[in-house]
Amino acid sequence: MRSLYLRILATLAAALVLCLVITLIESARLDRATTRRYIEGSITLELQQAQRVYEEGGPQRLASYLAEVDAALQGQRYLTDGEGKDLVSGVDHSEMLIPRTNFLGFPKTIHGRLVIVKSSADSRYHLLVIVSPPLGLPRFIPYLLLVAGVIALFGWLLAIGIVSPLRRLAFTVERFGGGDLGARIHANRKDEIGDLARSFDSMADLIQALLTAERRLLQDISHELRSPLVRLSFAAELMKDAPDPEAAADRMKQEIRRLTQLVASLLEVTTAEGDPSSRVVERFAVSAVLEPTVDDCAFEAEARGVRIESDSRSTAEIDGDPELLRRALENVLRNAVRYAPEGSAVKVKIEDSDDRVRISIRDHGPGAPEEALSRIFDPFFRADASRDPTTGNVGLGLAIARRAVLIHHGNITAMNAQPGLRVIIEVPCAAARAVVPPGR
């Protein structure tokens, strides 16, 4: 059955039918047991008294006695001989002596009345008692109808309560799959269906954010590629009639290097956001990654007349990808060196706490506009839009750093240090959380 709604209703209908059958069987059993308890003792006494009255006073006395008993206890009573002949009227009641039971073995009623036969020990006499069943089926009909109505009502409410939110969820998923990225369920239920709806909303939020970022990244890439390609095409045209072919070739090489740098940075972004299951997670000391990175960046700093002052004394360990964290630290350091004035220092400091390790990198450059601090980690964003693009910076370094830190369940922020810019990286220590693959 394809419809969950129909499956629920069919299951409840089957349960209702089974309940009715069991109720009927139980009512019949109770009817028989109650009748037996109600009559068994008194009917034995009635048979003995009727036999004595008949033997002492004859048919007339017996008729009077039976009439008195019928009036007192209700029903009709007949005393017959061993062959079933009525000892008062002479009517043949032999057919009533034949035991009658239904398919369940319970006493069978005749015209809605119960026939009970009690025989004497020597089988010379039989007392027939015809009475209305004390617990007949008609008495159960209102109860059964009430039970059926209640089960049907609650079954319908149950089916609606389960199927309706699932249909809403399916409709929302269909809308989302059709391109409506803002489709959400916003369920307030506290059960499993509510958990499923909230999981879908969380997934939809993540997918929408990723798709939006991807579209923005593609727009930025197309914008970034356009200028060097135009200049490269122009340089190629100039080479045809250039008086100095060597200078034109150098110009082309410069544009090619810029394109190479851009492609390499884009590949680094892709690597940072790759499949988390493909990364090797290991426990490592943060200082073991920071110190070599500082040493590597020191050469570039010296060439610019800048020094790096590092305080990397730390025993903190984290779980993650050391190479990914190294690239994040290197990008932040190179960005600080790039904007540090000649003769100044870039300060690197690491601090341990109970559950996190904090790395601070500060330069003494011009800093960034306050309104740009929240955007400097966006791809291709430059706080100084007029800066010469030929320097090779394409605005991806800090974006790569942020994504690498987020993969390690940390956070990265920037603030003006007046003078300069301070970037703070915080990552949870290995003891602060269970070992979970980055990005999960």
Image (spheres, grey):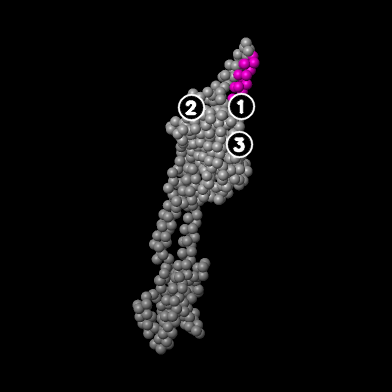
Percent x, y for residue 130?
42, 74
Label 1 amino acid?
Thr
Query: Could you tell me how far apart the alpha carbons at marks 3 and 1 are, in whole angstroms?
Result: 25 Å
| Closer to us: 229 or 92 | 229
Mostly what secondary structure, the magenta segment?
A: helix
Secondary structure of the residue carrying tag 3 is helix
Residue lying at the far bottom of the rendered structure: 56
Q: Which residues are magenta?
A: 245-259
Position above or below: 226 against 127: above
Label 2 amino acid?
Asp
| Tag nearer the camera, 3 or 1 | 3
| Image disc number at residue 234 | none
Q: Residue at x 46, y 51 (%)?
A: 191
Residue 254 is inside the magenta segment:
yes
| Tag nearer the camera, 1 or 2 | 2
Q: Is residue 365 left or right of residue 252?
A: left
* Residue position for label 3: 295
Q: Residue at x 39, y 76 (%)?
A: 76
Secondary structure of the residue carrying tag 1 is helix
Which is more N-terminal, label 2 or label 1? 1
| Image disc number at residue 384 | 2
Q: Residue at x 43, y 32 (%)?
A: 371
* Residue position for label 1: 260
Residue 119 is inside the magenta segment:
no
Label 3 amino acid?
Asp
Percent x, y for residue 21?
48, 62
Percent x, y for residue 288?
61, 43
| Closer to us: 300 or 216 | 300
Percent x, y for residue 232?
59, 19
**Residue 5 seen from this side:** no
Query: Could you tell me how far apart the alpha carbons at marks 1 and 2 are, in whole angstroms?
Result: 23 Å
